[in-house]
Image (cartoon, helix red, strand yellow):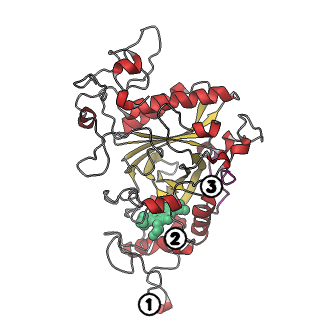
């Protein structure tokens, strides 16, 4: 159902489900909070900073949450499908679509709501987002290789012949110390919002809806986006203190998105993935305490950019292209041979770029008292074989940063295109 028609009556015929009001003049449900300005205007206009909007439509040509200006908070979850019933899987995707669409518009996950139903039944929303505005929530859903053939090689859902060849487990890279409990998954949901409670609410409700069909395999919270996905956004910093996202593919670069991010026609069986993308997720621990003891000059050499402005060491300002050949002292180059920005630079990888959308994480402290912290690296690419694996391989072998990194989680998902009115996410896969 189009959210433009999201009258409370049409969505469920009840008015009691949303605490905090939610009905604007004219009777449209616009959010859990009456103070939601974008909701009441029915707009998707950007915030004062010109970046993250108050709300985003769930449906469109591409799924939201890819080129959407990166929100500040993330809750990412990977799920195992625990049924072998194809109809149950399709039904789940339909119910996830409905609930995700509602939540992105600031509504409760279900039409009855957190407090609107019978007291002898569980509510169809968990309630922790009552009174909160939509927070720019996006919900992006992906399919892992196990959906097409499981670890035992079984084709549980009759999808094996629909698997694109490049959708397989990522290879082991040097430096990977993967925890299987933080890797893989048949389905994934990336929930991004300005408010962590809104993102967590989205994942929690989708997991609740999936009870008996899916089980959460692992999940990751993130804060402080480490990328810009729009030229309107300031470049944020990662936990090494460096600007991260400067040379990212941006939403405004439509030709680059077609070339590097969106899967094209003829690139997946039956074209079910055309207009979608591949999502690489890597949980990268950063040995913060060791890094913090490195001299500033060394830190800048490892990255190849200055820590202050983010300008390349070859000169200019943040958005100046790095001169990888500029000679330095002693027959070397100004940007070191093992500097991160050189090793991953498109010039060394056939021009391949990626749309990075990662987040910082701190998951408390480890057994030695160090921070269990790092970068939850998320990147959307048109083809992982050409746009991620060779770049990650080069990084693992030659990048000075690797001394300070440990990859503890890894997964690859195919992210289907956007959802049509009245359709459900991933529908083209089941056609
Ligand atoms: C395999 C892909 C990449 C991984 C993994 C990765 C990890 C990683 N990166 C930083 C910090 C920075 N990365 C920067 C640029 C950059 N990184 C990648 C790829 C991976 N990074 C690319 C393709 C680029 C862009 C290169 C270019 O086109 O010039 C930067 C510089 C600023 C920027 O452009 O974003 C920083 C800083 C960390 C700390 C990290 C692992 C924890
Ligand atoms: Fe990087």
**Which quadrant of the figure contains the C terminus?**
top right
Mark-to-mark CA distance, 1 and 2: 25 Å
Q: Earlier in the sequence, mark 1 or mark 2?
A: 1
**Which quadrant of the figure contains the N terminus?**
top left
- Dot 1 corresponds to which residue? 329
- Dot 3 corresponds to which residue? 177
Q: Give the range drawn in magenta.
A: 164-180
| Residue 291 visible in image | no
In the image, which is nearer the foreground, mark 3 or mark 2? 2
Q: What is the x, y in percent for residue 91?
A: 59, 26
Left/right of residue 312 with respect to residue 369 in the rendered view: left
Q: Residue at x 41, y 12 (%)?
A: 117
In the rendering, which numbered label is found on residue 423?
A: none
Q: Residue at x 24, y 32 (%)?
A: 40
Q: Earlier in the sequence, mark 1 or mark 3?
A: 3
Does the residue at mark 1 contact the one at mark 3 (Cβ under 8 Å)? no
Mark-to-mark CA distance, 3 and 2: 26 Å
In the image, which is nearer the foreground, mark 1 or mark 2? 2
Label 2 residue near ligand 1, CB within 8 Å: yes
Find numbered disc 1 in the image and state the secondary structure of the residue it sits on: helix
- Dot 2 corresponds to which residue? 346
Q: What is the x, y in percent for residue 216?
A: 57, 34
Does the residue at mark 3 contact the one at mark 2 (Cβ under 8 Å)? no
């Amino acid at each position: 159902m189009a959210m433009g028609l999201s009258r409370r009556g049409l969505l469920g015929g009840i008015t009691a489900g949303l605490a905090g009001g939610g009905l604007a003049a004219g009777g449209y449900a616009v959010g859990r909070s009456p103070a939601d300005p974008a909701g009441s205007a029915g707009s998707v206009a950007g915030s004062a900073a010109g970046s993250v909007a108050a709300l985003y439509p769930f449906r469109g040509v591409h799924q939201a949450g890819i080129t959407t200006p990166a929100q500040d908070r993330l809750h990412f979850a990977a799920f195992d499908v625990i049924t072998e019933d194809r109809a149950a899987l399709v039904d789940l995707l339909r119910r996830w679509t409905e609930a995700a669409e509602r939540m992105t518009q600031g509504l409760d996950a279900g039409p009855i709501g957190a407090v609107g139903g019978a007291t002898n039944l569980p509510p169809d929303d968990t309630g922790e987002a009552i009174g909160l505005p939509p927070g720019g929530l996006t919900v992006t859903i992906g399919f892992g290789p196990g959906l097409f053939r499981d670890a035992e090689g079984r084709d549980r859902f009759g999808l094996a012949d629909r698997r694109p060849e490049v959708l397989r487990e990522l290879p082991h890279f040097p430096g990977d110390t993967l925890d299987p409990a933080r890797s893989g998954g048949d389905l994934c949901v990336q929930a991004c919002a300005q408010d962590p409670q809104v993102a967590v609410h989205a994942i929690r409700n989708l997991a609740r809806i999936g009870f008996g069909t899916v089980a959460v395999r692992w999940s990751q919270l993130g804060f402080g986006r480490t990328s810009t996905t729009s030229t309107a956004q300031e470049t944020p910093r990662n936990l090494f203190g460096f600007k991260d996202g400067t040379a990212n593919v941006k939403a405004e670069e439509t030709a680059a998105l077609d070339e590097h991010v969106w899967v094209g026609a003829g690139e997946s069986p039956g074209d079910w993935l055309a207009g979608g993308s591949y999502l690489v997720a890597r949980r990268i621990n950063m040995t913060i305490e060791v890094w913090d003891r490195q001299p500033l000059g060394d830190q800048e050499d490892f990255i190849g950019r200055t820590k202050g402005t983010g300008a390349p060491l070859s000169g200019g300002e943040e958005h100046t292209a790095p001169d990888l050949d500029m000679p330095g002292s002693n027959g070397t180059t100004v940007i070191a041979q093992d500097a991160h920005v050189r090793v991953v630079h498109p010039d060394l990888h056939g021009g391949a770029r990626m749309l990075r959308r990662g987040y910082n994480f701190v998951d408390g402290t480890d057994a030695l008292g160090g921070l269990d912290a790092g970068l939850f690296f998320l990147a959307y690419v048109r083809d992982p074989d050409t746009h991620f694996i060779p770049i990650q391989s080069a990084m693992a072998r030659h990048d000075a940063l690797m001394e300070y990194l440990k990859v503890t989680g890894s997964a690859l998902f195919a992210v289907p295109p956007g959802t049509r009115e009245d359709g459900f996410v991933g529908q083209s896969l089941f056609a």
